[in-house]
Amino acid sequence: MGLDSTIEELLDQMMEHSSLVKKHHRVLEFGCDNGIMLNYFKKYKLELFGVDINGKSIEAGHRHFPELNLVKSTGLEIPFRDDYFDVIFASAVLKHIRYEDREKVYQEFSRVSKYIIVWGKNSEKKTVEEMGGFKFYHSNFKEELELFFHSNKIIEISDDILGLYEKK
């Protein structure tokens, strides 16, 4: 999996936004799988970290991308000190967090980082979808994130949003 050129261009706009310029040294990808999406951030010469709930994916990431700092975590407790990261990147992963866990995960985001970039499908209403043994908890992420973060820039791409948020 990778980024298509349009999404990469829009993500570049987020990373070069005035609130982030020259402020990012460490990036955490939340829901990093094996770390493949972190490759995008290599061009920024950052310290790259990832967390994922799937231990097998983390092990595969260690084999394929030994230069990345990948750690197993549910997101309910992100195993890094306060304000350790400059930005968190969460791509198509918020829909996997159960509704009852969202507040805790968002609190963890705001504890470990000042900024978050979110890319994913936004839904006006809550719906749970089951597919291939997985549950997807769709909701209005723009509204949910506004409880913990200020939006600096939101780009809507069909049903998806790409948003840069700063903690309150």
Image (cartoon, rainbow, N blue to C red):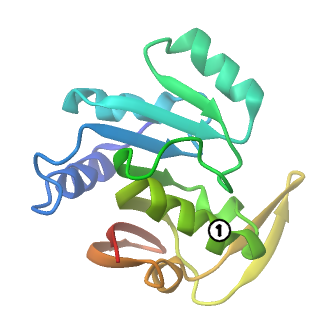
What residue do we see at 39% from left, 30% from top?
48
Residue 54 vs 117, above or below: the answer is: above
Please give left or right for residue 152 compared with residue 83 in the image: left
Tell me where residue 41 sits by quadrant.
Answer: top left
Residue 14 visible in rendering: yes
Front residue of 123/111: it is: 111
Q: Position of residue 152 (x, y in %)?
A: 24, 74
Q: How many marks?
A: 1
The residue shown at (61%, 63%) is 105
Q: Is residue 1 visible?
A: no
Q: Which residue reaches farthest front?
A: 81
Left or right: where 165 falls relative to 126: left
Q: Is residue 47 left or right of residue 24?
A: right
Return the x and y of residue 121 as percentages of the image width and height. 54, 69
Residue carrying label 1: 104
Q: Please, is residue 140 above or below residue 109 in the view? A: below
